[in-house]
Amino acid sequence: MQFNGLSQSYTRGQALPELLKQRILILDGAMGTMIQQYKLSEADYRGLPVNTRFADHPSDIKGNNELLVLTQAQIISKIHEQYLDAGADIIETNTFGATSVAQEDYKMAGLAREMNIVSAQLARAACDKFSTPEKPRFAAGAIGPTPKTASISPDVNDPGARNVTFDVLRASYREQIEGLFAGGVDLFLVETIFDTLNAKAALFALDEFFEETGERLPVMISGTVTDASGRILSGQTVEAFWNSLRHIKPLTFGLNCALGAALMRPYIAELARICDAAVSCYPNAGLPNPMSDTGFDETPEITSSLVDGFAKDGLVNLVGGCCGTTPDHIRAIANAVAKRKPRAFYREDTNEVSA
């Protein structure tokens, strides 16, 4: 199958580098925000009464959104399709917390591989349903940071203490990667990075997987600046963060979540200045507000206007939404940037300048 004259198989993301030169691509929005709209109960998370597999699970599992691919798959598929209908080129698998390390909180670490396989299959099916020769769609295997940090002590009285090791993270990420690949993702997205050492464990696991299998998919990397200091939680500036991970030669490198688009602008501008990769930005819908229906204040019009400002100034190649964003936000963003040109960038590894 060919897309826009490209002969590469779109099912494994090979067309993406060329598409990034042609236009600004659109990522989907928040999965958790959409799930919250269903107001699911503990019984719903267990799949009751239809699915009794987890009826006797010994701990509460409400809030374990990754489990829903096994107990409420139709909801996850519907959310994927809503984002694709809104114009998303790339959708994320519902696997942000689908590592054994993260699933330990629910006593479900043993389900991690299955969660990733099924989640990838759901995203793959949605992409296949919406893909056309003019507009192919791609499933990104979402790899979250886990609730633990390898470089920061959880105990203020013991700076040397750690609640997870690099090797444990690497093994957990490797399991996730294998599941996502088996389920059919087109690329991998290591996202919401607050600790670069955690990210290095995920990226090391990816590199091991690529080397051992001979398969190599595009990799997107996205960090999160946690406050007005302009640093990620483990202390790096945006420039240091880029320089720590640029050797991966990511397809895209950018920021998501955290501050919202308005406060994120100087850091996106910095990445646009220094990156030889495509720059991505998918912000929250502003700052949190518990009184709002989505938990965030910004309307689709506000968020899309701010993101369009990035596109107008030539700062970005891929945009979307994070916490608080909905299909309406993504549709507004897609419409706003439709006629904007993607940021030009020079790839040192290929001696290539993007169009």
Image (spheres, rainbow, N blue to C red):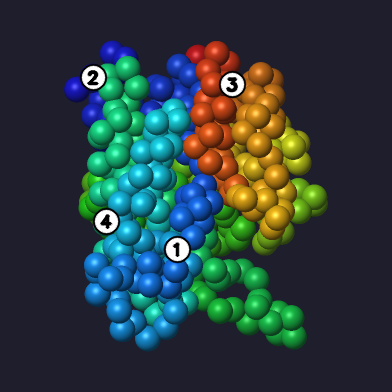
How many C-alpha atoms fall within 10 Å of the one at disc 1: few (<14), some, or many (≥20)?
Answer: some
The numbered mark at residue 2 is 2
User: Which label lies toward us, 4 or 1?
Assistant: 1
Give the residue displayed 66% in from the left and 19% down from the top: 312
Residue shown at 52%/47% (left/top)?
A: 30
Residue at 36% of width from left, 76% of height from top? Answer: 108
Q: Quadrant of residue 133?
A: top left
Decide which of tag 4 and tag 1 comes sooner along the chain: 1
Label of residue 336 in the image: 3
Q: Earlier in the sequence, mark 1 or mark 2?
A: 2
Label number found at residue 105: none
Question: With respect to residue 110, does 122 lie above or below?
Answer: above
Residue found 32% across the figure and 17% down from its top: 134
Relative depth, front residue between 129 and 350: 129
Whole-angstrom CA distance, mark 4 to mark 3, is 33 Å
What's the amino acid at mark 1? Leu
Q: Which residue does the numbered mark 1 point to in the structure image?
A: 40
Q: Is residue 228 left or right of residue 299?
A: right
- Read off the residue under disc 4: 118
